[in-house]
Each structure stands twice: as C-alpha cells, then as structure tokens.
Amino acid sequence: MSWGRVLRARHAVARPHWRDELPALLREGTQGGRKLLAIGLGRSYGDSGLNPDGAVIDMVGLDRAIAFDPATRLLRAEAGMSLDALLAILVPRGFFLPVTPGTRFVTLGGAVANDVHGKNHHRAGTLGRWVRRLGLIRSDGGAVELGPDDKSGVFAATIGGLGLTGLVAWVEIELIPIASAMMEVETIPFGTLDEFFPLAAESDGAFDYTVAWVDCLAKGSALGRGIFSRARHTANGPLVVSKKRLGPRMPFDLPGFALNGPSVRAFNALYYRNGGRKAGRATVPYEPFFYPLDAIGGWNRIYGKRGFYQYQSVVPPEAAHDATEAMLAAIAAAGEGSFLAVLKTFGDVPSPGMLSFPRAGTTLALDCANRGAATLALMERLDAIVREAGGRLYPAKDGRIPATMFRAGYPNWEEFARHVDPGFSSGFWRRVNQ
Amino acid sequence: MKVIILGATSAIAEATARLYAGEGAELLLIARQSERLETIATDLKLRGAARVETAVRDLTDSDSIAEAFADFVAALGGVDHVLLAYGVLGDQKTAERDLGEAQTKLRVNFTSAAGWALAAAEVLERQGHGSLVVLGSVGGDRGRRANIVYGAAKAGLAALVEGIAHRFAGKGPRAVIVKPGPVITPMTEGFANRKGLMWATPETVAAIVRRAADRGGPVVYAPWFWRWIMLVIRVLPAAVFNRLDI
C-alpha cells in the first residue's frame, strides 16, 4: 500500500537480511519475464513504490552501516537503513545528513531513488549530489559500483531513478559536520505571496534551511498568507540524538467527515494565528524542526480509509509568482483544504539525476484528502497551471498524471529509459509509459 | 559490560546486540557464517559498541564445548551476560517423518544449546555474577502436532535453564529462559500472514531479552501476554485441546 493509501496493490514479496542473498533473489524475481522492484519504508505516496502483479524485494532488513570515516566524512550503509538509524549514529559524532526530507523514516536507498531534497536545497542541492559511490545489482549484468565519475549514464539514471535501474544494495554519502544538535529557528508570518518571494530570496542568502507553510484556504486579500521559517545549526550545544520514542500513533482511520472544509479551515486559521504569536527566534532540537510529522506514527491515517493525494510541483523562477498564485487561488476556490501546504524556493544547484525532481524555481506541496472526482478535477486544474508554467510534478508523490504530463516535465525521460534494467518496473513506470 | 552472543546472526540476537551496542558494551559474536558476522560486527561498532570481537564456529558442534566457551571468555577478557539465541524451526512435516531430520533438530535446538548453557552456567557460578539468557519458545509449553520436535527441544531447554536458575538461587548469577511467541524473522519467512497482534518484531523481543538479563523471574514471555495464553493452553483438558487446530 502506498503512503497516500489511495493506491494499493498485491505483490510477491521477498524480505532478505543479507547482501549475499540479493543476487539469487534478483534472479528469482525476474524469472519468466516477471518484473521486480525494491521497496523500503513505504513513504512514497503514489505508485512509484508499488509493482502491481510483480515481485518486490523489501530492503528494510538490510539496515547496517558498512563503514564510516570521520576524516573523509564518508559513510557507507546498506540501502535499507533508515535515515533515523543513520542520525542515531551520526549526531553524537558531530555529523548530519547533508540533505534530509521531511521524514526520517525513509531508507537510504529510497532517498537516493527519489533524489530527495530538503529545506536546504538552495544551498546543498539534492541528496544525490552527496552520493559518492553506490552498489547496484542489475538483472542483466551483475553487480557494479558506480560514482559521479561514471560515464555510462547508469549512475545519473540511478540517482532519482525510482529504483528502475537495478537493485541498489548500498550507498556511500558524504556528510556535513555539525557543532550541535540544536537548530536556531526564526519564524516570520507573511500576509501575501508578494511578501513571500522577497522574504525567501533574502533568507536563502543567510540561512541554511528555509521553508514556508501556506494557508491554502485563505481567499482574496489573505491569499498566499503563511508562515516562513528559516534556520541553521547552532554553533554551540549538545550533540544528542532526539528522543527515540515516537509520540502517539494513529490507532485507527479517522472517519472521512472529520476532515471537512470547516475543520481544516479552522485548523489553518488557528495555525496561522499561532505562528504569528510565536514569531521570532527560538532554539529547538533538530527533530521537531525537520520532522514535525514523525511525532505522530501513522499520521497518514488521519485521512481515513479513502486516503489522500499529495501534490508537489515545481515551476521555474520566471513563472513562480504567477503560477503559485494561480494554484493557490484554484485550491481556495475549490475549498479543498490541506493541513500541510508547503512552499519553498529551490536554488539553481543542478540535480545530478536524469529524473531528479528539483530544479530552480518554486515548489508547492500539499495534501488533498481523497474525495473522488472533485479532488481529481482540482489536481487536473493544478496540472494545467504547472504545465503552462513549464513545471513538473514529483514522482514520489504522484499516482495519477498521464504520460504526456510526465514526459513534458522530464525531457530526459527517453535517455533515462535506455538505462532502465529490463527486469525492473513499477506501477508508476508502466503508467507513464502507456 | 561484556556480552557473549551465541548465534549472533539470528534476527533477535542482532536486534539485542544493537541495544547492547547503544550502551557501549563489549561484544563477542559467535556464528557460523564469517562474512555475515563481520557485517554485523562493523555495524555494531558504528552503533556504539566499545569493542566487537567475532568467532566463527558451528555451535551445533558439541565437541569440547567447555574449552571453547572458556576461550570465548578469555577473548573478551571476562563476561557479564551470555545470550544463547540460535535455533532452527525447519519444516515440521519433514521432521516428523524423517528421523534423521528430527535428530538434527533436537541436536541443534536442545543438545548443543544445553551444552553451551551448562558451560556458561559453570563460568557464571564460579565468578558469582552475570546473566545467562536463553531463547526458548512458547512452542515448548505444551506439545502440539504442529510443532512436535521443535516444541520438545525448546521444552527441554526451558527445563534446563529453569534448573540452572534454581541452582543459581542465592548465589548471584541469573539464568532466564525467554519464550517468544511468533516473531517476524527469517525463521518464520514463508508463514502465510505475519500480521496482527500475535506477531512480534525482533526489536520488541530484543527489548524484553535485554531487560531479562537485568531483572525479573527465570521464565519470561515475549511479549508478556503469552504467559496467560500459554497458561490457558496448558490447562485445557485433552478432550478440548485435541479439537483445536493450533
């Protein structure tokens, strides 16, 4: 099942625990034309982590650190290791992930396969830029070791390659040093998109991490209001791993009516005022800053049995203002609330992968509860705005767009397709190749 | 803290070793496959273990167990905790019909394990402190047709460890048999549906194993509710029990 819970599929699953088991599983999984896909912690929202009627190798049993050298800042680990487990090793030693997505419950292999980005994209680029080596096992050529010096194109295809270029067995990344596990965070409310862009431009120059939450139900003069937050690692402080234990878990699916227009509207209005009240500087541990949603285990269940869609787009800088405004207006008009609408400017650091999502511009990410046709219609309106602006959607969050939209957004797709391992496929890949 | 782990490549052993590593313990890992052993050893060092030694040995080999165990203790420079965590479940149907297979299963799960447990008991008793924690199974609490040979071996092992705990009484060391219910590990790969309340993760069981080394009684169920389930199963009259397909 995908993290969005709208898309579900049946698979034949293998759960290896050792690297020496992988070659045989690969042979077995691709036998008789069957297609294979490696999966991790299942945080992909759409169908990029599903392989309907095919085989999957669940990699979370391969979760060991292989080598770490503080002098070179290189860490090598098995692909199934979670970022959570990595942080537990790194933080006490004064190191941090060079790039981290909004959840630490993803595997290293999954993070590379989606070439994830974080709040420091304007400085650090994507995680793929920090990958120094990786071990790839192909159904048509055995095990290879690849790095940025690879001329064949397989490395560039594997970074952000959605697991389609073969089985990533291990990854070596370069880390960044930190002096403390604390973050110095500044929170600034903004009233409109016209205020957001200059604020983002100014902050990107002075802060490592920037991100904004937008109230996408606010209309008219309040359209585009939100809360901007910018942060850096503090220069002094303890090097302690944030609390290991999670907070409460969602024990059941919330009934569908719980998240309706008025309740989300009220939540967003309250959140905006609360953000206004808390505006200013604070020093907090890295965990609530980077991973607020990790505090609630199984938070995806608040959207109930029908699940939800996540929508994340990026539009180029020249179109950023108008396209973002048009999207927010469309969302507000549809009354489709979203708890977590996130706005961020991506820097112009090039992404190393052929299918990497991040590019210079502005990215908007939102959750939409699945209300059937109305939700799909809204997302199609957003698609049209994104396409017109020359933007694209994030495959990790998509389970829906037609092949034409994918191809328009990823002009390298044909080159990428040449590097796809013939034994590998996914629901996503079959959909965008229809 | 110095810890010897017999059968270190099992999923529950590895999860427990990670807890010890997080405490900065010194570990000696013993298993058959050297490459896998090294994989775990490197990982545990990075997870915080002060020192990780490995020894390659087929633990089912019952030759000179006492000497081998003394070598382990010497290699580590002492011992505080001993975890015995290896076993094979195998295919029940084969074990029932094929006597050779049944003998092998008994040798792995009982005969050899008993040898190591007794060797460890000897060392712990002599030094007057330390804990011996042995992985048993709820399957040893009452003989069932689904699990005749494995259950019998684990029943024997439980009785042995309880006996050691009795022998230790008032002398300082501890001996504990931890009896997990079904756990999602490679041992149970292939079971149809490993979801639901009955199935525990290796991490859950590891936390119980780790705690058992420090405190609690000589018989620990993992998770705790199996104590009550197995109590009911044990007292069921045969007339009722025979009708159950468990």
Image (cartoon, coloured by chain):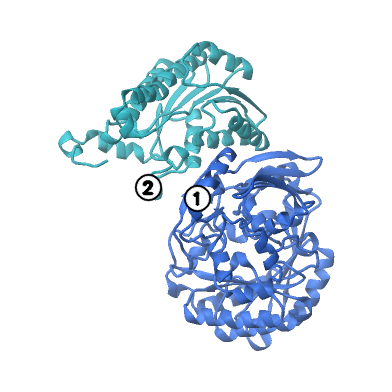
* Residue B73 coordinates in the image, percent (x, y): 58, 17
Residue ID for mark 2: B192
Both marks 1 and 2 on one chain: no
Furthest-left residue in this view: B239
> In screen coordinates, is A213 left or right of B179?
right
Chain under disc 2: B
Question: How many numbered marks does the figure carry?
Answer: 2
Report which colour depicts chain A.
Answer: blue
**In terms of image quadrants, where is residue A198?**
bottom right
Furthest-bottom residue in this view: A220
Chain under disc 1: A
* Residue B14 coordinates in the image, percent (x, y): 55, 35
Disc 2 marks a residue whose amino acid type is Ala
Report the mark closest to the observer, 1 or 2. 1
Badge 1 crowding class, 10 Å Cα cut-off, few under 14, some 14 to 19, many 20 or more, is few
> In screen coordinates, is A40 left or right of A256?
right
Disc 1 marks a residue whose amino acid type is Gln
